[in-house]
Amino acid sequence: MEKKFSLTGYQIKLIGIILMVGDHVYEMFNYVNPPTILNMFGRIVLPIFLFMSAEGFYYTRNRLKYMSRLLIGFWGMNLGNLVIPKIFPMNEVTIINNVFGTLFLATLVMYSIEACKQKQWVKGIALVLLPLLIAIPFLVTMSSDTVSMASVYLLQVFPSYLTVEGGFLSVLLGVLFYLLREKRALQFLALLVVSVVTTGFDFSHLLSNYQWMMVFAVVPLALYNGQKGRGDKYFFYTFYPTHIYGLYILSYFYLNYWM
């Protein structure tokens, strides 16, 4: 039975973008104590885009091209995160955002799964292990209190499960969305489990440790009708970095000239 009210993939992305802007307003203007609810509802954003990346990976005609766009976005954000703060230095705000790395790793594991299904075991296993192996030089030098800059630069070129935004759990959630895409109830159960795990099983501080609120992504995702919807597929790739750097620069001028 067709739902009386439903959302296309593009409409769900727009919801994610609206919530994302609020979250980043909170982040970039944290020194004026903006409403915490902006950050709370921002927890919904990453599950939305992980879900839609799983859908996008499944339907795309060229999976390598789809993944390459995410990797190029990851490189671009790393460069921007380095350059913008040098031009507009602030001690109050640090730019660490780069969800492209998380989405890329999630799709890389999806690609590995498909390779294993085709009995390309070496290729599939190697691709899954690569993001973990990439982090080893960084972890080894970090433990000796002499972090190798070469290892840091390596992580700027290729993301690791341990250093991407949202960490390993977010990558895992994206992969589970893909594996369970024919079983919507199990997808939502996976979201619930990951949300609970993010609390560290400490349920006494749910209002201060509210990463678990990512579970509310189930509301727009439950309305997904499986249709792509009309819209520019490159919009997110440009809007994401543009609004982050725009808000950061606005924060810089507010702090230094208007506050």
Image (spheres, rainbow, N blue to C red):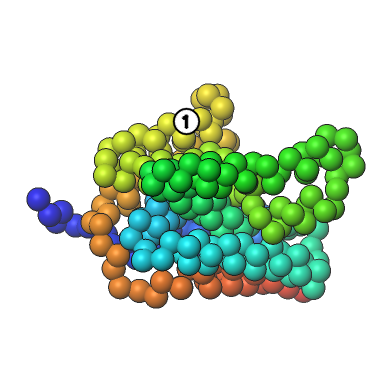
Q: Is residue 53 above or below residue 73?
A: above
Q: Residues within 10 Å of mark 1 (few under 14, many from 20)?
A: some
Q: Is residue 193 left or right of residue 7?
A: right
Q: Residue at x 69, y 46 (%)?
A: 134
Residue bearing mark 1: 196
Percent across and percent down for residue 117 are 38, 44
Dividing the picture into quarters, in which one does residue 228 lie?
A: bottom left
Image height of 18 relative to 201, above or below: below
Q: Position of residue 247 (x, y in %)?
A: 63, 68
Q: Is residue 175 visible?
A: no
Image-quadrant location for residue 81:
bottom right
Element under disc 1: helix
What quarter of the picture does the C terminus occupy? Answer: bottom right
Which residue: 69% across, 68% down? Answer: 80
Residue 178 in sight here:
yes
Image side of residue 73 versus residue 151, left or right = left
Three-letter amino acid code of the residue under disc 1: Val
Q: Quadrant of residue 28?
A: bottom right
